[in-house]
Image (spheres, helix red, strand yellow):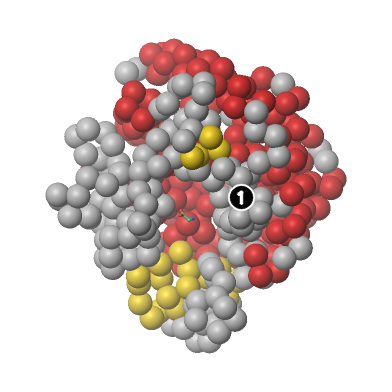
Amino acid sequence: MNRREASDWAQQVSRRIKEKVGVVAARSQGIIPFTSVEGRFDDWTDKNLCWWTNGFWAGEMWQLYNATKDPLYLERAQEIEKKLDGNLMNAGGLDHDNGFKWLLTAAADYRITGSKESRNRALLAADNLAGRFNPAGRFIRAWNDGGDGSRAGWAIIDCMMNLPLLYWAYRETKDPRYLQIATLHADTAERFFIREDGSANHIVEFNPATGEFVRTYGGQGYGEGSSWTRGQSWALYGFTLSYLHTGEAKYLNTAKRVANYFIANIPENGLIPVDFRQPLDCALEDSTAAAIASCGLLELSRQLPEPESTLYHRAALRLLTTLERERCNWDLACDHIVEKGTGAFHDERHEYPIIYGDYYFVEAVWKLTGEESFMW
Ligand code: GLY
């Protein structure tokens, strides 16, 4: 598919997205979906207001608002942003995923509407994220624990996607600490997460007192030393974003290494497994990894001259057209779009719709049509 054909294809898909999401948003007042049950979105407001995915539907609403200017989407996005104040005021419910939650809600609102209240929320979230930095190990602590410190030394590759909240806060305030923390973490991630072959660890544990490397964990992937595909996607897109915000060539090179590894591992059918190193007789899939990687590849393609640009653009189109053909549900009676996402390899449940699959699919299509509101 050449660029012209890709753009025509994306225009068609964009029309289908607008038709479907318009209907779904109209019937989804006040909810924060994670998945859908029998085709209807669930609501995580009371289930877990602090869950890391709670910004994605709002982010999708902003993308639709940017493309259509229909105030319905603005209302939906702002409803969620306000609800998340309950999370912002709950210290135990804040972690490194402040980026996912407040880039797609408050920071997006501020960028689009100029709301001062939203800017304030995003800065509070950025300060809390910066406060998770461990100076001895030069990493941002990922998750909380019960207060016993058992996860005080854990960093995870996903955090590369949270760094843009710090890059944003740096641009807003001109305080270099945000930039220093983001780049120190990115440097640590390059050194300890990205392996020689371009694959990425999910979890790295450091001694939180001395900063020394302790060990790696398989995390949400198959096992230690394996290659959890969503983690590879976070690394691919995350290092591309660190390049975009800093202009540091080392991050671009790392993004390319991860992208080359990812592309070399795409199965013949173009559908992405949960882990590139899961047993050969295991067909478990994670469509969300494909959607996220598509965004990363398209953004990477924009940063590079030919012929590399076309290489990454083609790889993204291969993933996206496969997702559209095989995994998108366009039935207007069903709330979700992308099917067969998987949270983690060892979860009991696999291959179900997950809201970030929809978000990144829309973002990727918007990158091709030029309708994107840049969130990161
Ligand atoms: N950031 C958590 C996940 O990707 O599941």
Hey, which residue is sitting farthest left in the picture? Answer: 281
Q: Left or right of 49: which side holds 194? A: left
Position of residue 161 measured from the top left corner of the image (x, y, whole percent): 53, 52
Q: Quadrant of residue 85?
A: bottom right
The residue indicated by pointer 1 is 44
Q: Nearer the viewer, residue 140 or 334?
A: 334
Residue drawn 57% across the image and 20% down it: 18
Position of residue 176 measured from the top left corner of the image (x, y, whole percent): 69, 62
Residue drawn 59% across the image and 27% down it: 24
Q: Amino acid at mark 1?
A: Trp
* Mark 1 vs ligand 1: CB below 8 Å: no
Position of residue 220 measured from the top left corner of the image (x, y, whole percent): 37, 60
Total marks shown come to 1
Hey, which residue is sitting farthest right in the picture? Answer: 116
Above-or-below relation of 176 to 235: below
Residue 154 appears in the rendering: yes
Residue drawn 36% across the image and 39% down it: 340
- Label 1 crowd (10 A; few <14 / some 14-19 / many >=20): some
Hey, which residue is sitting farthest front in the picture? Answer: 38
Position of residue 187 measured from the top left corner of the image (x, y, whole percent): 48, 64
Q: Nearer the viewer, residue 257 or 100?
A: 100
Residue drawn 53% across the image and 31% down it: 335
Q: Nearer the viewer, residue 104 or 16?
A: 16
As helix, strand or loop, the secondary structure at mark 1 comes to loop
On the rendered image, what quadrant is the C terminus found in? top right
Residue 294 appears in the rendering: no
On the rendered image, what quadrant is the N terminus found in? top left
